[in-house]
Image (spheres, grey):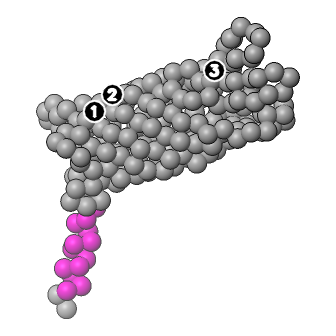
């Protein structure tokens, strides 16, 4: 008879233990990547993304004695450059991205930690440019490293390196005759403040 009561007490205790070990973070960084578009209609055309200011919010909870489960939300503000053979390079459309990834992080050596995960990235629609018929939602694979610098009173500073991969195309591009889907690799550097209540 005592076992169910002990089990109930343990079940009630788990959320409070997890809440006590939850960490929150907010950060800022720059993300840049390989070309979004490369095709040939009348001449070679390439669309590249410029370094994008990106804001992140994150949360981690224990997954095991060493690893932690993490969720990261990222909002990016990007601009493009367009290169056409025989013409000067010029500014292309701006766009915003909203990414959500879930993953696992754990220690590598000392204050250095790894993170690996997957999620989605949404290119937010725009009135003009390659997102005017709506922005795609794409699968995102991600990995990275965090270097933690503890401050005090549950607050720490994190230096971050991120890499992600996606397959990029939009409806507007296909309408214009850009038939290829592009492999896009992105790299980001940033700083974040972490709080553990």
Q: Is residue 2 magenta?
A: no
Tell me the CA gap for discs 3 and 1. 29 Å
Q: Nearer the viewer, residue 87 or 132?
A: 87
Is residue 97 something that shows in the picture? yes
Residue at (21, 74) in percent of width and height? 9
Question: Are the residues at dot 3 and dot 2 in contact (C-beta closer than 8 Å)?
Answer: no
Vertical arrangement, residue 167 with respect to residue 124, above or below: below
To which residue does mark 1 refer?
A: 158
Estimate the x, y position of residue 93 in percent, counting from the top left. Answer: 68, 20
To which residue does mark 2 refer?
A: 191
Question: Are the residues at dot 2 and dot 1 in contact (C-beta closer than 8 Å)?
Answer: yes
Estimate the x, y position of residue 68 in percent, counting from the top left. Answer: 29, 53
Q: Which residues are magenta?
A: 3-15
Place residue 48 in its image quadrant. Answer: top right
Q: Secondary structure at mark 1?
A: strand
Q: Nearer the viewer, residue 1 or 41?
A: 41
To which residue does mark 3 refer?
A: 80
Q: Residues within 10 Å of mark 1 (few under 14, many from 20)?
A: many
Residue at (30, 38) in percent of width and height? 146
Question: Are the residues at dot 3 and dot 1 in contact (C-beta closer than 8 Å)?
Answer: no
Q: Nearer the viewer, residue 44 or 20?
A: 44
């Amino acid at each position: 008879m005592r076992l169910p009561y002990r089990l109930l007490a343990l079940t009630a205790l788990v959320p409070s233990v997890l809440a006590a070990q939850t960490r929150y973070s907010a950060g800022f960084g720059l993300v840049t990547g390989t070309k979004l578009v490369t095709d040939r209609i009348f001449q070679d055309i390439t669309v590249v993304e410029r370094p994008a200011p990106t804001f992140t919010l994150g949360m981690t909870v224990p997954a095991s004695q060493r690893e932690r489960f993490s969720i990261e939300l990222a909002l990016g503000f990007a601009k493009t450059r367009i290169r056409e053979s025989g013409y000067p390079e010029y500014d292309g459309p701006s766009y915003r991205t909203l990414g959500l990834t879930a993953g696992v992080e754990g220690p590598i050596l000392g204050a250095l930690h790894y993170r690996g995960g997957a999620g989605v990235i949404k290119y937010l629609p725009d009135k003009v440019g390659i997102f005017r018929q709506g922005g795609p939602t794409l699968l995102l694979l991600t990995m990275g490293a965090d270097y933690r610098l503890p401050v005090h009173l549950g607050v720490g500073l994190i230096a971050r390196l991120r890499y992600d991969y996606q397959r990029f195309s939009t409806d507007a591009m296909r309408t214009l005759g850009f038939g290829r889907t592009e492999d896009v690799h992105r790299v980001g550097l940033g700083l974040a403040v972490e709080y553990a209540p």
